[in-house]
Amino acid sequence: QVQVVESGGGLVQPGGSLRLSCAASGSITSIYIMRWYRQAPGKQRELVAFITSGGTSNYADSAKGRFTISRDNAKNTVYLQMNSLKPEDTAVYYCNVDLKAAAGTAYVSYWGQGTQVTVSS
């Protein structure tokens, strides 16, 4: 009953910007951590950034200074603003959310299907 859906990917020129969104919906009582991962062809999936329910965020070195993660707790949505994009940022970007589907249960991790980001001239 829980869905995690990403949007906002696309083709952008080097130096450009994109804003990714990820919305969690369904039976949700609370969300703890919301994360963005990415996976480039032939490479392992890597953590790009995360943000906690209290607003604490952290970034991979490759994202620092260029990407900004934020969340809207009322909408169960996390965003990733990506500026100064480089060809090496090309990847499928995945959203990962730790949430509770009912009070008194443990946090469970859910993944979205991913959204393609391509940085090319």
Image (tube, rainbow, N blue to C red):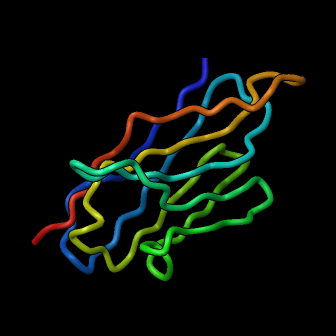
Q: Which residue is found at the position 66% from the left and 66% from the top?
A: 57
Q: Position of residue 90 (x, y in %)?
A: 25, 60
Q: Position of residue 43 (x, y in %)?
A: 28, 51
Quadrant placement of the C terminus: bottom left
Q: Is 8 situated above or below 119?
A: above
Q: Could you tell whether 15 is left or right of 33 in the image?
A: left
Q: Which residue is found at the position 39% from the left and 48% from the top?
A: 45
Q: Which residue is found at the position 74% from the left and 45% from the top?
A: 32
Q: Could you tell whether 108 is left or right of 4 in the image?
A: right
Quadrant placement of the N terminus: top right
Q: Position of residue 105 (x, y in %)?
A: 83, 23
Give the farthest residue toward the right: 104
Residue 20, quarter of the rendered image: bottom left
Q: Position of residue 18 (x, y in %)?
A: 35, 65
Residue sitting nearer the eye, 72 or 14: 14
Q: Could you tell whether 13 is left or right of 84 in the image?
A: left
